[in-house]
Image: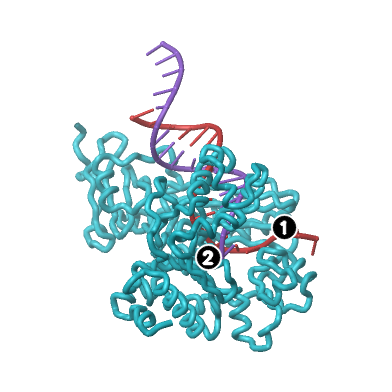
Chain colours: A cyan, B red, C purple
DNA sequence: TCTGGGGTCCTAGGACCC
DNA sequence: TCTGGGGTCCTAGGACCC
């Protein structure tokens, strides 16, 4: 590391602009795969420089335990579910020597390594260590994309470096690893730097633990071709098996398959992705804050549940927890789902979509219980879960409170979905101007009329009945006192035309 | 007593609308 | 008159990631 590069870690206010960011929802980012989807249809420019960095903390949960408990250092440590149906979350390298792996059942881990320390995990400690690491990364570049507590991409093109040549980014990567070690009290990180997310992620895996690999631009394919297809993120057991049957094991072999054949083998989206990734084509940007899409709570029980009343009580409690987390992050959602895993591991899901978003525990619980009622659980249930998706950051209660109506969810729930209106000209205009990306037009019945709502701190309303054409669309900032006064009275009804 | 919990994304079929 | 295509939304299930 050189002084020049060390100094290039921008500590100016501008450089720290992203410090302390969370997702839009303010949720701690816990899990996000890089998957295969975000490749654009026409993958064109691959970066000319190795300016994407991927950092991965080594055996993160176990390493935090060893850091905080010196007696565990140098010994096998397994963090995960410790009950009869638990699985391994993280195994220290000492435990990996005995064949203990992530996602293995704790039962099997105990058989392989009986003398390891089995711990259930201290997520506050992990979150805190993670936050310190992310702060170091954001100190370096405003473009940091956390994938989970222990992983992130950093766009070095925004790091204010004098250049992006290999010696410069190598020195910066070493500096970052040293700073991570420093701020976490001794945790090590493996880092990959390359011309794309895909290659950076693969590179960070090559010299674990505590390693650094910088892929020199132009050498990507030479690095990739000999590797097994399973190194490609998004290629799991099912895809490996399909490819194996087609005689494909390595990336080099994958490269020889036509795009049409790949689509036939693994489907449209994954086929196109694999076709490009096999050629090291990946132009996905580093995206600093991605929006939360769903919130869920689930639990696996030590013995199978058979009592319907008990299941109903569990689902009610889980709905409350989901609602609490939604509310805590200013979110609400329209689709309520339940997940049921039967005694034989058959997994069922059922969902139902409300006309307007909710964060109300009673509404979510009621719907979840109704969905559960329609399932045959007589053989026993090992897992139950409740989730809400179709999230908006607009909460319907605001709108109803503004319209001076009774509690929202009753009316909302009774509004048949098939009465949902499409945006008219004015609605469409609002949609493009102020509506959150991906957010649907929502409405709910209000007296004899209709109320329309939007997010992003803006509420859009209009009055309409079965007998009259739609009234003018009015919009208010959510904190506008005029919104409180807005009513859909008779005199505001437009004349029939 | 095999097989967690929190997520993301994709697929496929049906409904519905234009 | 007959057949149809595209787009969007919803639901259920599955693959995958950490």
Residue at 35% x, 67% y: name it. Answer: A157
Residue at 59% x, 40% y: name it. Answer: A265
- Secondary structure under tag 2 reads helix
Question: Pointer 1: what residue?
Answer: A305
User: 10 Å neighbourhood of mark 2: few (<14), some, or many (≥20)?
Assistant: many
A182 lies left or right of A299? left
- Could you say which is closer to the camera, residue A315 or residue A436? A436
- Secondary structure under tag 1 reads strand
- Could you say which is closer to the camera, residue A170 or residue A241? A170
Image location (x, y in percent) of residue A16: 33, 76
Residue at 37% x, 45% y: name it. Answer: A445
Mark nearer the N terminus (2 vs 1): 2
Question: Pointer 2: what residue?
Answer: A203
What is the quadrant of residue A313 in the picture? bottom right
Q: Chain of mark 1?
A: A
Image location (x, y in percent) of residue B17: 37, 31
Residue A398 against residue A77 in the figure, above or below: above
Q: Is residue A329 visible?
A: no
Residue at 30% x, 60% y: name it. Answer: A457
């Amino acid at each position: 590391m050189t002084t020049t590069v060390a100094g290039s870690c921008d500590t100016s206010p501008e450089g720290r602009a992203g410090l302390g960011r969370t997702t839009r929802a303010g949720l701690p980012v816990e899990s996000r795969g890089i998957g295969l989807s975000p490749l654009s249809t026409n993958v064109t420019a691959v970066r000319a420089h190795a300016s994407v960095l991927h950092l991965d903390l080594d055996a993160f949960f176990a390493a935090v335990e060893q850091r905080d408990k010196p007696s565990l250092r140098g010994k096998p440590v397994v963090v995960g579910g410790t009950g009869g149906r638990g699985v391994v979350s993280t195994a220290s390298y000492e435990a990996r020597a005995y064949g203990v792996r992530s996602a293995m059942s704790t039962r099997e881990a105990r058989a392989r390594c009986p003398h390891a320390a089995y711990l259930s995990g201290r997520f506050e400690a992990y979150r805190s260590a993670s936050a310190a690491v992310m702060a170091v990364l954001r100190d370096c570049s405003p473009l940091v994309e956390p994938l989970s507590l222990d992983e992130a991409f950093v766009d070095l093109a925004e790091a204010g470096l004098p250049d992006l040549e290999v010696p410069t980014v190598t020195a910066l990567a070493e500096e970052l690893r040293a700073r991570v070690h420093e701020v976490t009290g001794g945790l090590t990180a493996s880092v990959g730097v390359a011309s794309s997310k895909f290659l950076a992620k693969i590179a960070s895996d090559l010299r674990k633990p505590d390693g650094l690999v910088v892929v020199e631009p132009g050498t990507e394919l030479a690095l990739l071709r000999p590797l097994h297809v399973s190194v490609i993120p998004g290629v799991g057991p099912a895809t490996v098996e399909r490819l194996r049957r087609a005689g494909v094991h390595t990336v080099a072999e994958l490269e020889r398959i036509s795009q049409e054949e790949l689509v036939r083998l693994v489907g449209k989206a994954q086929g196109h992705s694999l076709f490009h990734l096999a050629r090291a084509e990946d132009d996905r940007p580093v995206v600093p804050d991605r929006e939360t899409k769903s919130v869920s709570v689930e639990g696996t029980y030590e013995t199978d549940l058979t009592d319907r009343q008990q299941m109903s009580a569990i689902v009610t409690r889980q709905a409350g927890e989901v609602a609490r987390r939604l509310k805590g992050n200013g979110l609400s959602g329209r689709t309520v789902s339940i997940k049921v895993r039967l005694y034989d591991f058959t997994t069922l899901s059922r969902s139902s979509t409300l006309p307007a978003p909710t964060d109300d525990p009673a509404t979510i619980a009621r719907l979840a219980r109704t969905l559960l009622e329609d399932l045959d659980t007589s053989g026993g249930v090992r897992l139950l879960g409740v989730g809400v998706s179709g999230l908006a950051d607009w909460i319907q209660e605001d709108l109803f409170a503004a319209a001076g109506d009774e509690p929202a969810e009753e009316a909302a729930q009774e509004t048949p979905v098939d009465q949902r209106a499409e945006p008219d000209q004015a609605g469409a205009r609002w949609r493009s101007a102020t509506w959150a990306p991906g957010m649907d037009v929502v409405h709910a019945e209000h007296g004899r009329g209709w109320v329309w709502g939007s997010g992003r701190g803006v509420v859009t309303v209009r009055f309409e009945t079965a007998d009259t054409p739609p009234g003018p669309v009015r919009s208010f900032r959510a904190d506008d006192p005029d919104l409180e006064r807005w009513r859909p009275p008779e005199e505001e009804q437009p004349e029939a035309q």
